Each structure stands twice: as C-alpha cells, then as structure tokens.
Image: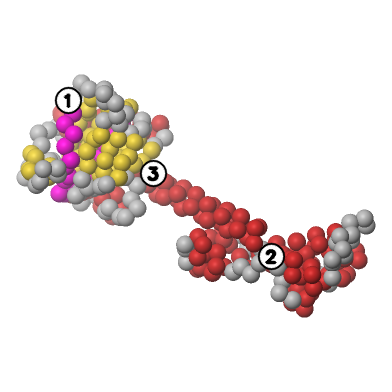
Amino acid sequence: MIYNIIMRNKKKHLQVVFQKNQFPLSIVHTKIPEFNPVYIEHYHAMELELQFFKRGDGYYFIKNRRFPIKPASVMIIHRYDVHHYIKSGEKPFIDKICVILSPNLFEDTQTRRYISSITKCTKNFNHHLLLREDEFSKMELLLDWAEDEMKKENHFWKENVILCMEQIILMLLRGLKEKKQRIETEQTNRFVEMAFSYIEQNFTSRISLRHISEILNISPFYFSHLFKQYAGISFKTYLIKRRIEEAKKLLQETNLKLIAVAHKSGFSDANSFTKIFKKFTGLSPSAYRKIFHIPGKKTLE
C-alpha cells in the first residue's frame, strides 16, 4: 500500500490511504527494525486506523496523549487524530498489524448500526485496549484470513473480508464496553471508599450528603446513587446506623448521661437521639443500657 502524504504544516500531515473506487481496507504487517520507521505526525481525513501489537516497545502519541505499546493490545485511532510512533531506546522494535479502513466498508451490513461507537471520538474514548491472549489470537487469525482473501480475490472475496472485519469490530466493541464498565466500577469503588473513610472520621460531626459530594467533586444525586448501589442502603440510613453503633458502644462501656452519649455519637439532642435509637433497635437508650451494660467498664462523664 502506497500512501500519499499531503503537507499541511511542518509537523502534521494528512495521509490519504484509498484512491477512488479502491476497496476501503488495508492490512499491513510491520516489523521494526526490519522496516525503517518514519516518525511523522499524521492523520486521516476519513479512515479508522487499528494497530494490533503482537510485541514491541515504545509509545504511540494520539491526540496529545501517550500510550505505551503492550503485547496483545490494539490502538484505535480516529479520523483527524494526529498520531505517530515514539521509539523507546536506541533500537526500537515492533511486531504489529496495521489496519486502515473506511466505515463505508460496513454500510450494507448489520454492523453499521454499531460502527459509530468505535469511529466516533468522544472525550474519554479508550484509544488503547488490552486484550486477552485468546481474543487477540482470534483477531489475528481473522486478519490473516481477510488478507489472504484480498490477495487471491476468489469468488465472494469481498463478502468474506467484510465478515472477518465485522467480527473484529464487534469483538473490539465488546472489549471497549467491558473496559468502560471496569473503569466505572473502579471509579465507583474509589468514590464510595473515600466516602466511607470520611464518614468514619467525621460521623460525630455535622456532615451531609451534599457536603461529601462537594468534597468528591461529584453531584449529590450521582453520589447518592453510587452510595446506595455500593452499600445497599442510602447515605442517610448508613450515617444513622453508624452513629447508633457508636451510641451502643458508649451505653455499654460508660456511665455517660444520655445527652452526652447523643452528642458524642453525632446526634443533635437527646430527644431525637432517643426516638431514632428506639426506631432502629426496638429499645430506648436507657433500656438498652440496663440490658447490655458491661460491668467494670465505667468511664465517668
């Protein structure tokens, strides 16, 4: 495949891949240093570029972000994404398959309904996708088959090539979706764990859902949803239960007056403390102390 490079400025070039009426798919196996690499920043006006890395070192620079090259991974590069290879060390080495295609390849297929999910470059798009070994092997076999069909041009070769590429695109879409879910789960866990830590350190003070959401820099509605999804109960219920657990401990181990127990547990006054305590335990604070007070542990007020 011979590419036409059109100079736009000293650093960035438009790379024209397909000529008019040419089949809109290119599959090129590349091994560096066998191939002398040219590290030119470039972009494509219409095409989607997929870099399948078998082995290698260095980085890919895509749209102001740097991604490390890892075995069994794919770089997804959209149109107008300025990109180039950055070598690591004096002797760069890459064993990869470069696939460049036009989304028009799928215009008469069912995959056209989903292709925009991979061709559209959203703000947080995951350009680098690390695959399982078996997934990468399947894609490599499909690419080899598609390349062989393109070379031989036997009956129905175009249909077979498109079928191969459809399977690859669908596998990538599934991988991107799973990666997004993992990232969202990790983010959820991080937010809620930070919230739990803050509650544990400050539950005896006046804290609120809005206050913690401001600390986490997320909306109160989103934080409320995340917290309930993670803990199984609302933030308010969790906070009350934590304060009641502290009150139980104080009632068991000290002779503090109820008003002091209430304040040290995070309740504003004795009346609301008694009402809430009885609602959640079935006993008044006084009755609970009579039943569960531990002899010998009498820290006086």
**Left or right, residue 43 beside residue 94:** left
The one nearer the camera, 116 or 129, is 129
Q: Residue at the location (24% across, 35% down)?
A: 85
**Residue 38 belongs to magenta span:** yes
Q: Nearer the viewer, residue 111 or 226?
A: 226
Q: Amino acid at mark 2?
A: Thr
Amino acid type at mark 3: Gly
Q: Position of residue 269 (x, y in %)?
A: 74, 76
Residue at the spot of label 3: 175
Horizontal and vertical percent position of residue 116: 27, 54
Q: Which mark is residue 152?
A: none
3D distance between C-alphas at marks 3 and 2: 44 Å
Mark 1, mark 3: which one is toward the viewer?
Answer: 1
Mark toward the start of the polypeptide (1 vs 2): 1
Residue 281, placed above or below residue 128? below
Label 3: which secondary element:
helix
The residue at the point 57 percent across, 53 percent down is 193
- Which kind of residue does numbered mark 1 sit on? Asn
Q: For the residue carrying disc 2, how many other residues have a C-alpha within 10 Å: few (<14), some (14-19), or many (20+)?
A: some
Q: In this picture, which residue range is highlighted in magenta? A: 36-54
In front of the other: label 3 or label 2?
2
Q: Please, is residue 160 above or below residue 258 in the view? A: above
Mark 3 residue crowding within 10 angstroms, few (<14) / some (14–19) / many (20+): some
User: How far is the residue under mark 1 from the one under mark 3?
Assistant: 32 Å
